[in-house]
Amino acid sequence: MKTDKRSRRPPQRKPQSPGRKVYHPSKALRTATLIVMLVLSVAALAFAFISTRSLISTAFCALPIGIFIALVFSYMVYAVRHTYLVLAPDGVEYHTANVAIRTPWENIERVIEDPFAPRLVLRDPQPVEPLTKAVRDRTWSRTPSGRAIPLRLFGYSRSSELHRDLQRYAPYLFQPAERSPQA
């Protein structure tokens, strides 16, 4: 019996191994991005109307602006859906829409808890794995490598679940620095 293409089952996802935790961009970040895009869209339409003072002219002026904003917004949604961070017993994986970086826990030197850009700093740069044809086709003057993994996208703070999981996998990152004895 022939099956209809529309009735096929979706591909099966790999079972998640024990201890493996996947983080996606935070809802607050997604919401803020949406609000910024909406504000820019309204501002562009208002600018088009004010500069032309005609509804018909505004429509023709706003059409390319609207198409541009729609394309940028579509790419942002695509990028957010394909960005994630994986914490596993054997290491960390950071995936974006275009590239991926994988490193073992032993290679993570420290956590920089900057309020605007918290990140994991790597001891040795790791090779960046290109995930799209456009990235693979680029000619690199040297092998691209990742030196840091951003955490802000995933809602990192000292009270977050991500912070607790990092402490569980790599407690040495949160130990106070040893001080030399005073003379």
Image (spheres, helix red, strand yellow):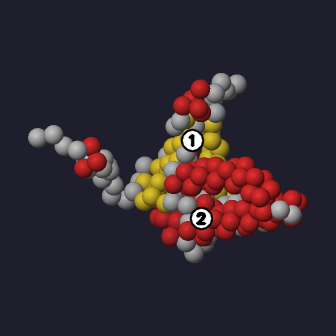
Residue carrying label 1: 98
Residue carrying label 2: 30
The residue most toward the left is: 1
Image location of residue 48, percent across then percent down: 82, 59
- Mark before the other along the chain sequence, 1 or 2: 2
Going 88% across and 60% down the picture, which residue do you hit?
A: 51
Which one is in front, 4 or 40? 4
Task: Say what amino acid the circle numbered 1 marks.
Answer: Asn
Going 50% across and 70% down the picture, which residue do you hit?
A: 161
The number of discs equals: 2
Going 45% across and 58% down the picture, which residue do you hit?
A: 22
Secondary element at tag 1: loop
Q: Is residue 182 left or right of residue 173?
A: right
Going 49% across and 60% down the picture, which residue do you hit?
A: 23
> If the image is split into quadrants, where does the C terminus sit?
bottom right
Image location of residue 164, percent across then percent down: 51, 69
> If the image is split into quadrants, where does the N terminus sit?
top left
Whether residue 176 is visible to the viewer of this picture, yes or no, is no
